[in-house]
Amino acid sequence: MNRDLTVGAPGKVLWRFCLPLFASVIFQQLYNVADSLVCGKFVGNNALAAVGNSYEITLIFLAFAFGANIGCSVVIARLFGAKQYKDMKTAIYTSLIAIGVLCAFLMLVGLVFCKPFLRLISTPAEIMDDSALYLTIYIFGLPFVFFYHVATGIFTALGDSKTPFWFLACSSLANIGMDILFVKSFHMGVAGVAWATFICQGISCLLAVLVIFLRLSKIKTDKPAAFSKNLLFDFLKVAVPSTLQQSFISVGNIVIQDVINGFGPEVIAGYAAAIKLNNMAIGAILTFGNGMSNYVAQNIGAEKPERIRDGFFAAWRMVWALCVPIALAYYFGSTALISLFLENPSGEALQTGVLFLKNVGPFYFLVSLKLLSDGVLRGTERMKAFMTATFSDLILRVVLVKILASTVLGVRGVFLPWPIGWGIGVGLSLWFSSKSMKKSTNPVTD
């Protein structure tokens, strides 16, 4: 069901829109969490380390999918808010064509450079084969990943956050069942969790794209163009900076993974478990930032900029209410949570995971403000400001990790820089977004 985000009390509108998005991200994260949990419990710590090691490289591909999602979502939401339905359809078709070309190129690069990428991050020999196997199967499934992310962006641009939720809920639960079946019953090891994800994502993607075309057929317009260079440019103005942001984050995480790999498989396994839990928390918080992007873009298109500030403060209250239970669970329940992923929950792997969660968990309140502010910047298309805040955060974090990890702090030096970088990013993003909320109704393209 399409929903107009330009009418109604901002708090209620955002709550109804963001709640299904939040649930969707939880199920999305279950894909990767399930892979790690099943490998750790039924195969062993080396299998968990292999999946976690490959995961940092898959995040580069996901960066492009995320950029495409945000790019098409902001442009389509603005056209939907302005009720320019014919151009909106053209924007959708243009996005699908562009993402198909991009996906084909990335698959070629990924298949050719799979093992060189893994060597680049100093993957230990004992987990190299499993890491390469998992990554190769993942790359073959990239079309499903990309087109599903674009479909999700289209749904949310139309104000529909419930349909993606139902697709993800069903496919994620099916993925957990297939992970266990392939690994425990068929003894397929790392390949089993990779193929389970491939199959479930594929079915979810095909159904999502089918529903998109059925939904478009019900919006009556003159025949739209199949492709528009101008709309492609609008799409790229948002998608490229968003992709660069996520890619830069992924490259930074790969640098951090390289540092982690120097501590051996046990530390890699503990970090893999903790980073999955961290990404689940960040992903849940990010839904409110993405919701803000669509909310802001629709209201910009409808020439109702006065609703943006009220929406921001309403989302702030909601996201901090979410951060309270997450921070408490990760700090006080860290041992139990990390133990879920480990075959033998003791020793260095457990200590590493617990250390990460206790150092990072209390600062989710901080990073949530940045993600909300980023949503405003994307919705108003202030992409240079958006990139400046993100890059400042990550550069500082990576530099400090490289320095501190080589000191007596050891692995603790990998985790301490996270809240420091987040603090810098929050300050910049809040400053830029406060200026953006004072601008005119037209998107700013600084």
Image (cartoon, rainbow, N blue to C red):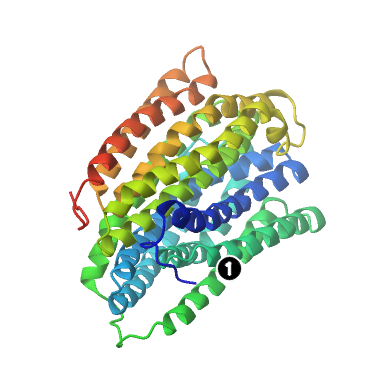
The answer to whether residue 382 is above or below residue 7 is above
Residue placed farthest to the top in the image?
Answer: 408
Residue 167, picture quadrant: bottom right
Left/right placement of residue 344 relative to residue 378 reads right
Q: Residue at x 30, y 47 (%)?
A: 377
**Is label 1 in a helix, a strand or a loop?**
helix
Q: Tell which residue pokes out farthest to the front in this image.
A: 9
Give the residue at x 32% y 46%: 309
- Residue highlighted by disc 1: 204
**Does residue 175 appear to the left or right of 153 in the view shown?**
right
Q: Position of residue 61 (x, y in %)?
A: 44, 53
The residue lying furthest to the right in this view is: 185
Up-down: is 299 above or below 38?
below
Q: Horizontal and vertical percent for residue 415? A: 50, 25
| Amino acid type assigned to the residue bearing label 1 in the image | Ser
Q: From the viewer's perspective, is residue 87 above or below residue 99?
A: below
Q: Could you classify mark 1 by the number of other residues whose Cα lies within 10 Å: few (under 14), some (14-19), or many (20 or more)?
A: many
Q: Quadrant of residue 272?
A: top right
Quarter-wise, where is residue 278 in the image? top right
Q: Position of residue 432 (x, y in %)?
A: 26, 39
Q: How many marks?
A: 1
Residue for point 37% across, 86% down: 220
Question: From the viewer's perspective, is 336 left or right of 212?
Answer: right
Closest to the observer, 65 or 265: 65
Horizontal and vertical percent for residue 209? 49, 74
Q: Is residue 284 visible?
A: yes
Residue 402 vs residue 438, the one in the foreground: 438
